[in-house]
Image (tube, helix red, strand yellow):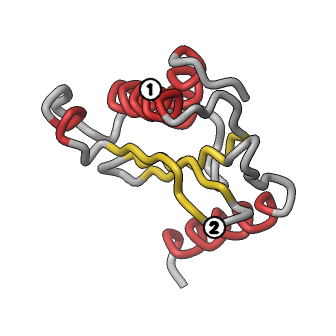
Amino acid sequence: MSFETDRRTARRKRQVSNRVRVRGTAERPRLCVFKSARHVALQVIDDDRGVTLVSASTMDPQIRGAVSHTGNAEAAKLVGKLVAERARAASIEKVVFDRAGFRYHGVVKAVAEAAREGGLSF
């Protein structure tokens, strides 16, 4: 087993154990963050119905043209603002933040701060 597999497995364990406490409802859906080395993706999810209400990622044409590198904190800020904009358009103001086992720093922190600036509260 390689070091990379151990890290991935450890993150997955943290994600699953945290999912017990972090659950999205119709009133407060879950804002889930996924990041890779190249991209950042966000989803606003209603876990009661099992439906993604709003999503945004660095693969969206609006973001892709605005930044040169899509896996950094600068791109994460744009994605956070975009998902907040789309959520507000869908009448969503309060969410539960799910960092999906990632540490709250760098890209994840940039997403959270940008979403808060965009009008989401969590």
Q: Is residue 96 above or below residue 89?
A: below
Q: Which mark is residue 50?
A: 2
Query: Around disc 1, counting alpha carbons within 10 Å, would you say few (fewer than 14), some (14 to 19), or many (20 or more)?
Result: some
Residue 33 in picture, x, y percent from top left: 54, 47
Amino acid type assigned to the residue bearing label 1 in the image: Glu
Q: Is residue 44 above or below residue 109?
A: below
Look at 57% across and 62% down and name the residue there.
51
Judge left or right: residue 107 versus residue 112: left
Q: Secondary structure at mark 1?
A: helix
Q: Which mark is residue 85?
A: 1
Judge left or right: residue 77 versus residue 90: left
Image quarter (top left, top right, bottom left or bottom right) of the C terminus:
top right
Look at 52% across and 51% down and name the residue there.
53
Frontmost residue, 108 versus 63:
63
Q: Is residue 30 above or below residue 19?
A: above
Look at 74% across and 41% down and name the residue there.
28
Amino acid type assigned to the residue bearing label 2 in the image: Gly
Residue 47 in picture, x, y percent from top left: 70, 61
Look at 36% across and 26% down and name the residue there.
78
Q: Earlier in the sequence, mark 2 or mark 1?
A: 2
Residue 101 in picture, x, y percent from top left: 66, 55
Query: Around disc 2, counting alpha carbons within 10 Å, would you say few (fewer than 14), some (14 to 19), or many (20 or more)?
Result: few
Frontmost residue, 67 versus 44:
44
Residue 115 in picture, x, y percent from top left: 54, 25
